[in-house]
Amino acid sequence: MTDERPNEEPQLPSEQGTPGIVPGEQLPEPSETTEDATGRGEGIGEAKEVEGLSQGQVVWRRFIRHKGAIFGVVTLGLVALLAISAMGIGPIPGWWLWQDPMKPLTQVNQGVPTLTLPTWLGGPGFEVGEHPFGQDNIGRDNFAAVMAGIKTSLLVMTVLGLTALVIGVTIGSLAGYYRGKLDTFLMRLTDLAITLPVIVLGAVLGRLIGGAPTKFGLPLEVGQWITANMPLLLGFALGMILWPSLARLVRAEFLSLREREFVDSARVAGASDWRIITKHILPNAIGVIIVNTTLLMSAAVVLETALSFLGFGINPPNVSLGALISMNQSAFQTRPWLFWWPGLFIILIALSINFIGDGLRDAFDPRTKRIPSKREMDKALSRISPANAQEVAS
């Protein structure tokens, strides 16, 4: 007996049913937000947030989200504003009463700081007084000296950073782009500069600059100019010995970038080497350059302090934070406030620049992923459909 059944035409794979889905029902389109949520480590939906923004805008957005970097910018800005406004800059005088940090004055309250804390911090009431940071043994105002020292340290830091930036980028870019014999020569020169002890070489250069008028019998005007511009000359000298690390990093970036397709396209289009270096490769290496320059500037603050403390850096009549600690080292037991304030501002400046460098590194490096917090995850999940949110959450 034959089992007769109606002839059924085979269904195509697209017409066959899918478990859990009614045939003929329109399938939901995949959610881009879900894909971003499961595939990106910088935060759910960040690709949507940066869509349509330029590279500079993306870097700025990442930078302002870095709390340490914002703390560094605000702190460094306030310290610089306080020092420059108090002691003036160039022909513009400052608002502080004592503009000459080396001028002896009458001691007030045996040189104890007149700055007092407010009552809610346990003090007798907030008051600045004539000498908020105290005085030394001959009555010189410590606040004026510290503010002048901050200006000097910031000047040395800026000049050092710019000098190391120009030398390091020039040598690193030429070595990485042209390679060959030029690369070998420049890298051996860089290796030689790295082997030299920085603190010893800086001390020698500082001593040569400071003693040049007497040793070489220079005219009085030249000696006075060197003495007045000692911070500028010291920053330039230190920048000429701290460039090797930046040069090696720039060279490594150029070796990688010169093999990219956009460089080949520019070369085929007839662009000169100068244009390829400055317009195509250098902008793509700017992240490494900026980050490492800020770290060099942070090291410059500590190096200048060490040299001035040893007597090989800034000397009177110029004032620096390290020179203040060196001049008052014999008064550590009797007048400790002469150490507290210069040391505090050295730490603040160095930490601020380090935090700024960390923020710039995270902003420029797209490989640096930030793990989103639970609040950000919940906020991102609320923007997608309930079904996809349950799938992502599981």
Image: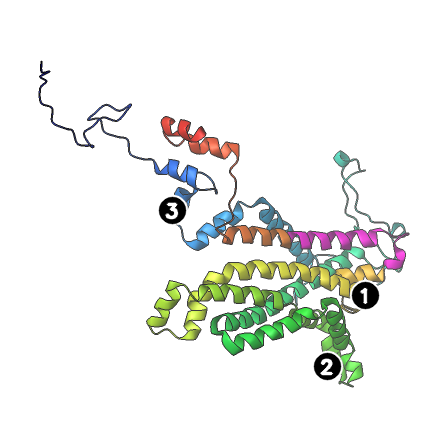
Could you tell me the amino acid type at mark 3? Glu
The residue where tag 1 is placed is 310
- Within 10 Å of the Cα at label 3, are there few (<14), some (14-19), or many (20+) other Cα atoms? few
Return the residue nearer the eye: 250 or 145.
Answer: 250
Could you tell me the amino acid type at mark 2? Val
Q: Quadrant of the N terminus?
A: top left
Task: Return the disc, 3 or 2, that comes first in the chain's sequence.
Answer: 3
Q: CA distance from mark 2 to mark 1?
A: 25 Å
Q: CA distance from mark 1 to mark 3?
A: 54 Å
The residue where tag 3 is placed is 51
Which quarter of the picture shows residue 186? bottom right
The residue where tag 2 is placed is 222
Could you tell me the amino acid type at mark 1? Leu
Q: Position of residue 258 (x, y in %)?
A: 44, 67
Return the residue nearer the eye: 321 or 278.
Answer: 278
Picture residue at 75% right of the left edge, 85% below the top:
219
Single out the mark in the foreground, 3 or 2.
3
Q: Position of residue 53 (x, y in %)?
A: 40, 50
- Within 10 Å of the Cα at label 1, are there few (<14), some (14-19), or many (20+) other Cα atoms? some
Residue bounds of the magenta highlight? 329-352
Is most of the magenta stretch helix, strand or loop? helix
Is 160 on the left or on the right of 59, as rendered?
A: right
Q: In this picture, is 127 found above or below 295?
A: above
Which quarter of the picture shows residue 304? bottom right
Q: Is residue 345 located in the magenta-colored stretch of the structure?
A: yes
